[in-house]
Amino acid sequence: MSTPSFSNVTVDSKANIYFDGRVVSHTIRFEDGSKKTVGLIYAGEFHFGTVAPERMEIISGECKVNLDGTSETLHFKAGSHFDVAGNSGFTITVVDGICEYICSFLS
């Protein structure tokens, strides 16, 4: 699997740091006004709320996800993705190692 790369973007050098540094990302801004974040999730369990719909692409490692309002635990590995509705949320668990991701904001 090749790792995605992006051209003609602006990167916010200030990191988005959550959960005492256990989740860290940087925002990438595209010429068309859209944005993504690329980041790392260290081992642990973390809950995120959403405003806009999001797509989480797993590019390295693996995680377990529970979408708000569901009881099913979903498993994702590198090369897979999951979508989260706007005004919702999800709990993501990384059991071991580091999970790398790209988050695309869909609206």
Image (cartoon, grey):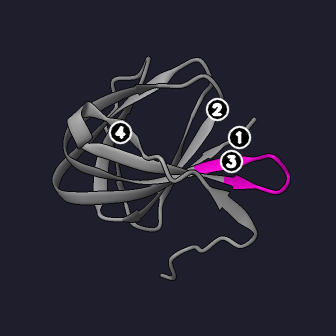
Q: Which mark is residue 17?
A: 4
Q: Nearer the viewer, residue 70 or 87?
A: 87
- Which image quarter holds the C terminus? top right
Report the Cα–Cα distance between label 1 and label 3: 9 Å
The amino acid beneath tag 3 is Lys
Q: Which mark is residue 23?
A: none
Q: Earlier in the sequence, mark 2 or mark 3?
A: 3
Q: Earlier in the sequence, mark 2 or mark 1?
A: 2
34 on left or right of 58: right
User: What percent of the width, then of the height, locates residue 84?
Assistant: 55, 34
Which dot, 4 or 1, sits closer to the camera? 4
98 on left or right of 89: left
Q: Secondary structure at mark 3?
A: strand
Q: Residues within 10 Å of mark 3 (few under 14, many from 20)?
A: some
- Which span of residues is magenta-colored? 29-36
Report the Cα–Cα distance between label 3 and label 4: 17 Å
The amino acid beneath tag 2 is Pro
Which residue is the site of mark 2?
A: 53
Disc 2 + disc 1, Cβ < 8 Å: yes
Q: Residues within 10 Å of mark 1 (few under 14, many from 20)?
A: some
Report the Cα–Cα distance between label 2 and label 3: 12 Å
Q: Earlier in the sequence, mark 1 or mark 3?
A: 3
Residue at image coords 53%, 20% = 88
Which residue is the site of mark 3?
A: 35
Q: Residues within 10 Å of mark 2 (few under 14, many from 20)?
A: some
Q: Secondary structure at mark 2?
A: loop
Which residue is the site of mark 1?
A: 106
